[in-house]
Image (spheres, helix red, strand yellow):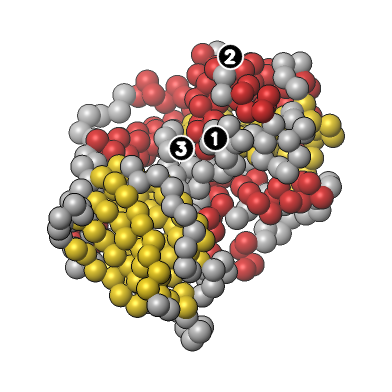
Amino acid sequence: MHNKNNILYSEYIKQTAIFSWFLFVTFIFCINISVAEISINVSKIRIGIHGNHTRLVIETSKPIAYSAFILSNPDRLVIDLPAVNWRAGRIKDGGLITGLRFGLFKAGISRIVIDAKQSIKIIKHFRLAPSGSNAHRLVFDISADFSNLNYKKIISYDWQKYISQKKLPTIIKKISIKNSTKSQKITIVIDPGHGGPDPGAIGIGGSYEKKITLAVAKVVKKKLEKTGRYNVILTRNQDIYIPLRKRYGKAEKHQAQLFISLHADKIGRSNVRGASVYTLSEKASDKEAAALARKENKADIIVGEDLSIYDENVAHILLDIQQRSTMQESAYFAEMMVSELGSKITLLRNTHRFAGFAVLKSPTIPSVLVELGYLSNRKDEKLLSNSKHHLKIAAAILKACDRFFKRKKHLNGM
């Protein structure tokens, strides 16, 4: 009877692995299709001040569908467009607008997030056809809002039509049973921090954290999978935004045994450099760790996520027995990571730190956040843009993973 249960459980794991692989391939295929079909360019974005309102003008190569809404705490205007080629560059602050971010928010949808000085409302929105030297234009007029009322989402008449036409591609080919061999490998999820409208830190030389973390993640994936022992899944494989909860949620969905989030921060002191490793804790190890956690936890706000949809009790995970056990395993792996990184690259002092990082809050999967270095330091920024340095990081992560799972195998008496 015991053997029969084992066989049934093995078959369940096999089918789960096949289904997970199917979903993953479908998701990636969908994203690639949407990117390939991009045919609209955003060539310029302008700000004008007209009396008591601020005008935002977005120039496009074709008429474009859109959706927009207002968020508070902090105050933002969020504009969703079909996937576009962004060629507009940056804008200067003006009127009620203090900043702008752009990126691919999800498959087929680009997002613009406009930061505002205070509570705002949309008083007018419309499209203009080309005239003279002007291209197609999408126009938003915003003004201060003192009503403290939730502003209704606005959409163009063709936005719903665009959304309804977005369908997941059908994969007709049957998935070979050979793919179930992945279930026998150790699954690790690598999370390239930031992405899409959220660039993360921007280095003194102009490098973007979101690009560096993705580049390193791809090298780590290749290094680990080459051994034949690991099945590595990236939370994102291109410049797209993934909400914090969905990052560790992806690890839980794929029943990963380890979650590694990669970052490259920037601070006010340009002489500080070196890598560090963070784990989850209710109480931060120091002020710097606490400040970093606060910054990283704002990622969803940066890209225009409405966090009011989450219950406050859900946002603060209760550290039960299972969570504490996972935190202990995370700490073991962090120490191994520190040791291996230290043999390859420069480390920050007090290398293993801890704080309340939202991305590390899986109650079942050991999780660490690796700060690869500081983009505020010229030497670190240069190294983090170097492919040879990426290989050193990947080699260290591989050794740490090998040590961690060797220890687990020994403890389990296998």
242 vs 46, nearest the viewer: 46
- Indicate the quadrant where residue 335 lies: top right
- Name which residue type carries label 1: Gly
For the point 36% across and 67% down, which residue is it? 55
Q: Is residue 315 visible?
A: yes
Of residues 313 and 133, the one nearer the viewer is: 133
Which residue corresponds to mark 2?
Answer: 388
Which structural element holds mark 3?
loop
Q: Amino acid at mark 2?
A: Lys
**In this picture, is 397 found above or below 269?**
above
Q: Residue at x 84, y 32 (%)?
A: 349
Q: Residue at x 70, y 50 (%)?
A: 293
Q: Earlier in the sequence, mark 1 or mark 2?
A: 1
Residue 399 x, y percent position in the rendering: 68, 17
Q: Residue at x 21, y 64 (%)?
A: 127
**In screen coordinates, is 130 left or right of 281?**
left
Q: Quadrant of residue 370?
A: top right
What separation in Å lies between label 1 and label 2 (alpha carbons)?
20 Å
Q: Secondary structure at mark 2?
A: helix
Point out the frontmost of discs 1 and 2.
1
The N terminus sits in image quarter: top right
| N-terminal-most mark, 2 or 3 | 3
Question: In this figure, which residue is indicated by the disc labeled 1?
Answer: 206
Badge 3 local density, few (<14 within 10 Å), some, or many (20+)?
Answer: many
Viewer-proximal residue among 55 and 299? 55
Instruction: Tell me residue 334's x, y (percent).
Output: 75, 32
Q: Residues within 10 Å of mark 1 (few under 14, many from 20)?
A: few
Q: Quadrant of the C terminus?
A: top right
Vertical position of residue 71 compared to residue 357: above or below:
below
Residue 220, horizontal then vertical, whole percent: 56, 22
Q: Position of residue 183 (x, y in %)?
A: 49, 27
Q: Of the residues under marks 1 and 3, which one precedes in the sequence? A: 1
